[in-house]
Image: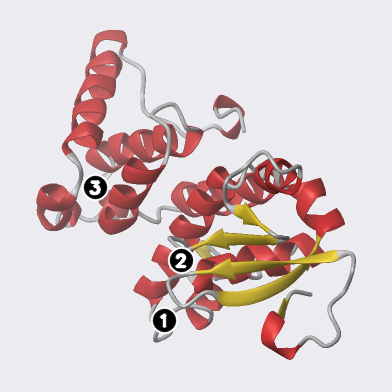
Amino acid sequence: MATDGAQVEPPDPEAITVKVGPQEKKYILHTAFLSHYSGYFRGALSGKFSETDDGVVKLKDVDTDVFSIFADWIYNQQIPFHKRVGLKFTNLETWSKLAGDGTRQDGVMLRYRAYCLADRLLCPKLKCTIFEQLFDDFAGKTYPNAAGVTTVVERLPERDPLLRLVVDTLCISSTDLFHWGDNYWEENLEHLPQVVLAKVASTLGVYLRTGAKPKLKRSDYDI
């Protein structure tokens, strides 16, 4: 498991220091795990990246709460427990305990940010695991959080499968008011990014022309 570097003595010759956030919190992480799971760190440890300085990798623009998710995951390949109870998914309860003040909103945002960090660090297995959670939640009629959607639009490449999943889910929300409630769009419309709304309108136009019904299928998303 990842350990705060301030508590490690003596230094492990098979580990490096990663300094995260504006306060440069130290993580002592083993190079074998970093290189195996993260393409970003494979490059950094090869000396190709400017972020590496005397065996130290600095990520000043990364939040420590989300990096801690990554740091723990490379050791145990586990993320907050995901369990289905009836038609409700309870994994956000555990995410919430790991984030901020422990509110559901904090948990929602932490999960979106963890996905974006996995993309940035070129960590496809972690990214896929979080995507599976999001897909299950959206298929279970959990709506995309507007602030989270804004985060992924700002941080992910345009063709990322999560962006497509968000658009498809919003298309379903516009045609399935029984499950979503008729106030979803009223509450979220002004907060969703224009680029997402444009994609929703375009996708709905295709459905109208073809007569197809919006539907989520895991096999439609290559990740």
**Front-lying residue, 77 or 56:** 56
What secondary structure is found at the residue carrying circle 3? helix
Residue at image x 67%, y 38%? Answer: 48
Residue at image x 89%, y 64%? Answer: 14
Residue on which disc 2 sits: 110
Instruction: Say which label, 3 or 1, has the lower sequence index.
Output: 1
User: Could you give the CA–CA distance between mark 3 and mark 2, rounded to whole angstroms?
Assistant: 27 Å
Q: Is residue 3 found left or right of 132 in the rendered image?
A: right
Residue on which disc 1 sits: 100
CB of mark 1 within 8 Å of CB of mark 2? yes
What secondary structure is found at the residue carrying circle 2? helix
Q: Give the residue type at disc 3.
A: Leu
Residue on which disc 3 sits: 177
Residue 89 in the image: state x and y as whole percent.
53, 65
Q: Nearer the viewer, mark 3 or mark 2?
A: 2
Q: Give the residue type at disc 1.
A: Gly
Instruction: Say which label, 3 or 2, has the lower sequence index.
Output: 2
**Front-lying residue, 220 or 116:** 116
Q: Give the residue type at disc 2.
A: Leu
Q: Give the colour scheme of this rendering.
A: secondary structure
CB of mark 3 within 8 Å of CB of mark 1? no
Q: Residues within 10 Å of mark 3 (few under 14, many from 20)?
A: few
Q: Nearer the viewer, mark 3 or mark 1?
A: 1
